[in-house]
Image (spheres, rainbow, N blue to C red):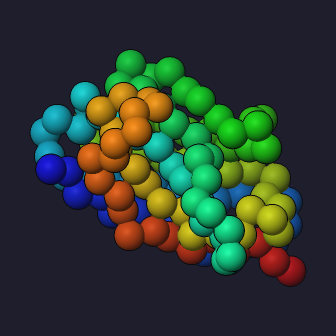
Amino acid sequence: QVQLVESGGGLVQPGGSLRPSCAASGSIFRTYAMGWYRQAPGKKRELVAAISSAGSTTYADSMKGRFTISRDNAKRTVYLQMNSLKPEDTAVYYCNARLRVGSPTSVSWGQGTQVTVSL
């Protein structure tokens, strides 16, 4: 089992940037596909971006060109660089581990980090 701990959320003005990170426990982190999801109040949790164990990336259409997911296997950490943030990006952002991108079964979820985009 892998434990995930997110950090780096916060309050930012529209057009600003944030870079939350997700630290994982366990030596087999490098074998997992990692993802970021988000859930806004009253809405379903949705995929933001995912990265395979080999480094291939996938993004939701509304995040393409603004968000970048990356991973550092040596640090067992996955990052989400978020640029040009909009108020509609306000949500709790969750880190997720799966055996592979698109797998229907999650290995683990983090506790979430709040991102608020507002003046």
Closer to the camera in the image, 108 or 104: 104
Quarter of image, res 28: top left
| Count of number-bearing discs | 0
Q: Is residue 66 visible?
A: no
Q: Position of residue 61 (x, y in %)?
A: 76, 37
Quarter of image, res 110: bottom left
The residue positioned 69% from the left and 39% from the top of the image is 60
The residue positioned 74% from the left and 50% from the top of the image is 83
User: Is 90 on the left-hand or right-hand side of 74?
Assistant: right
Q: Position of residue 38 (x, y in %)?
A: 59, 60
Residue lying furthest bottom: 119
Image vertical order of residue 40 relative to residue 68, above or below: below
The residue positioned 79% from the left and 44% from the top of the image is 62
Q: Position of residue 40 (x, y in %)?
A: 66, 70
Image vertical order of residue 38 relative to residue 30, above or below: below
Q: Position of residue 52 (x, y in %)?
A: 42, 27
User: Is 28 on the left-hand or right-hand side of 106?
Assistant: left
User: Is 38 on the left-hand or right-hand side of 77?
Assistant: right
Quarter of image, res 67: top right
Image vertical order of residue 68 relative to residue 37, above or below: above
Q: Quadrant of the C terminus?
A: bottom right
The residue positioned 68% from the left and 76% from the top of the image is 42
Image vertical order of residue 66 relative to residue 95, above or below: above
Q: Is residue 116 visible?
A: yes
